[in-house]
Image: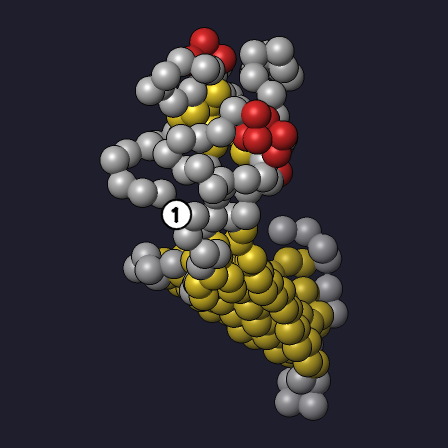
Amino acid sequence: MYSASPSTFPAYFPDWVLEQVPDPVYPDASGIRLAANFGQDSANPYNNMYNGSFNRNLTSTLFTDLILDQKLDVLLKGLSFRGKASLSTDYQNLMLTASYAFPNYQLNYDNIGKPGVNPWFRIGEGNELYKLPPLDINVGGLTSSYRDLYYEMSINYNNSFGKNNISALVMINRQQKKSGNAFPYYNEALVGRAMKDYSRKD
């Protein structure tokens, strides 16, 4: 209603319109005809709802986080191991697709009854004989993909000897991202840290 005035052209021409105003190029034509936009930027929304085109998509998304936190006091008091692995994926597949549209017509009321003049005009009309093609349904494929793999491993040590407190950490992590056919993105880091304090004072 905002983009096209409803009084300019109808949503469609009922079957009785074609009976009273036959199409001389297609004398056997019958039924309703969708009305094309006339003097407006947009057609009637009914045309879009009547369109037979469709896409059926399937999206598979996965988020996983695995964490292992193990104390190793049996080897050394205050020693621990921590590992983490994370995998996130997103795959979008076009399962079925069809491109199908009914023809749209304009009816020039001024040409009704004029000898040798066809009041009907089909959008995209040419000299060839038009025949509505059958619905063509095709199988699509993978349209987009995303994969993010991250993992890290660390050795931690934290212990006290009287008023002396010692802590240390060694960690390595790695991340790999890949989107579609783009070259994978890699990020790798190695972290080390050692701290000592006396009576909780640096």
Task: Tell me how the rendering is colored.
Answer: secondary structure
Mark 1 = which residue?
131
Query: For the view shown, which residue lies furthest in the bottom direction?
Result: 74
Q: Indicate the position of residue 18 as horizontal and vertical percent values.
A: 55, 30
Q: Residue at x 55, y 58 (%)?
A: 57
Query: For the view shown, which residue lies furthest in the front direction?
Result: 115
Q: In which quarter of the image is residue 108?
A: top left
Task: Report whether 19 appears left or right of 148.
Answer: right
In this rendering, does residue 25 appear at all? yes
Q: Indicate the position of residue 152 as horizontal and vertical percent values.
A: 52, 69
Observer-nearest residue: 78 or 122?
122
Q: Which residue is drawn at 42% across and 20% down?
A: 119
Q: Which residue is drawn at 53% across and 73% down?
A: 153
For disc 1, the neighbor class at 10 Å (few under 14, some 14 to 19, many from 20) is few
Give the vertical position of 113 relative to 44 (above or below): above
Observer-nearest residue: 95 or 3?
3
Observer-nearest residue: 88 or 24?
24
Question: Mark 1 falls on what kind of element?
Answer: loop
Observer-nearest residue: 78 or 9?
9
In this rendering, does residue 13 appear at all? no
Give the vertical position of 183 relative to 43 (above or below): below
> Quick one: quadrant of the N terminus?
top right
Q: Indicate the position of residue 181 as horizontal and vertical percent values.
A: 33, 60
Callout 1, which amino acid?
Lys
Give the vertical position of 121 relative to 70 (above or below): above
Q: Quadrant of residue 200?
A: bottom right
- Number of marks in picture: 1
Q: Residue at x 56, y 12 (%)?
A: 8
Task: Report whether 129 appears left or right of 145.
Answer: left
